[in-house]
Amino acid sequence: MIRPNMHYADLKQSYLFYRIAQKTKAYSEANPEKHLYRMGIGDVSQPLCPAVISALHAAVEDQADADRFHGYMPECGAAFLREAIAAHYAERGVALAPDEVFVSSGASDELGDILDLFDRDSACLVIEPAYPAYVGANVMAGRRIVHLASGIEDGFLPAPDPKLEAELIYICSPNNPTGAVFSRLQLQSWVDWANARGAVILFDAAYEAFIEDETLPHSIFELPGARTCAIEICSLSKTAGFTGTRLGYTVIPKDLERHGMNFNGMWVSNRTTKTNGVSYIIQRGAAAVFTPEGQRQIRETISIYKNNARVLTEALDALGIWYTGGKNAPYIWLRCPGGMDSWEFFDRLLHEIQVVGTPGEGFGACGEGFFRFSTFGSPEETMEAANRLRRLLKNG
């Protein structure tokens, strides 16, 4: 009899967003006349920008012409897109060769798939609160997980501890769920720590486009030493509204080696074995993001979400509620008022003002007592949610 991967039995039975969906479904079925204001799951509300739409249409037309038709694409990404991404990094002073950029169907896929490069005996460090998939992917792989807690005292940006024992480290900055962003000095300490131990950082930069403080690093490769210890995973989901279109990219420097193995070359082998690449149409749409007009248009869309953050944080300021995030990130991480636990606060918001957020407990034990709001809703719904929050909590 075949033996299944028994590590799946170690996964949490109640996945965070599934539990939220079940609770909101039950409420809606019992109260069909009530409209829900969804500030929980980080899905975007604004459409793709015109430059992307034009490029997608043009690519579809290419597929209707025998002379311009494209079948299978290169597994690691089309040259035109890899070159455009490398040029985008160059504008920030980061020199990448196009073949150090790998096109993917999204950061979520890559954050799990990239684990193929590492021995299962390698321990993985997860800074919590954390995106739940970091833990889930490593549980399924049977890898030992080291949990590093963070909190208000360190701004949810912990420093490396010399006593930590791990070979693989997830760092997300700007962070999901807390919205906190590592400074150059703080991130440099992790780069130095990883290089000193021969560890590898998996740097999740899915939200870098939301950074407005230019003293903060957008890419880990802005820092000395990162090319020998880091892999960067990026996404157009929040940057350019590709949540339903699906495209991301991963940067693996050729300098990154361990035990005589080159991770860039290993990933070429992995992709050419396990994928057939991302479609021509989607890659053409993605390339439009990196044109001057595409960059201008996506910044306009991002400004809508940043204004949503301003509306929500102004409400929290008026209520005297502690929070982080919102300025350089699309998430706001707040302390639940009145000593409530995070699911208690979730239920109160849902049942009393029909606002849906995300309980902090779902991001790790140290997230208990905190709550996440997403700023990706429509401006109208965000304003209404903020007003309802003010009315509900102004008297405690």
Image (cartoon, grey):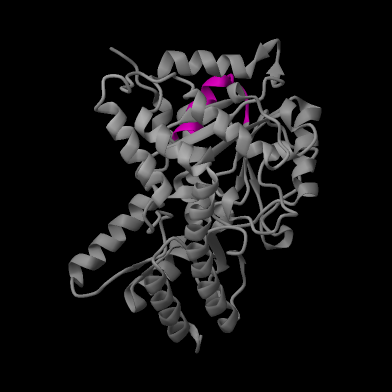
Where in the figure is residue 293, as x and y percent of width and height?
Answer: 51, 49
In which quadrant of the rendered view does residue 379 lie?
A: bottom left
Which residue is rendered at x = 39% and y = 23% of the image? 5
For the residue pair 321 and 209, the one nearer the viewer reads as 209
The residue most toward the top is 260
Quadrant the N terminus occupies: top left
Residue 111 on the magenta span: yes
Where in the figure is residue 266, as x and y percent of width and height?
Answer: 57, 15
The residue most toward the bottom is 395
Which residue is rendered at x = 75% and y = 32% of the image? 194
Which residue is rendered at x = 45% and y = 46% of the image? 237
In the image, residue 4 sits, relative to residue 319, either above or below, namely above
In which quadrant of the rendered view does residue 177 lie?
A: bottom right
Where in the figure is residue 306, as x and y percent of width and height?
Answer: 53, 64
Is residue 143 visible in the rendered structure shown here?
no
| Magenta residues (range) | 109-123
Where in the figure is residue 156, as x and y percent of width and height?
Answer: 66, 56
Main secondary structure type of the part rendered in magenta: helix
In the image, residue 143 sits, relative to residue 218, either above or below, namely above
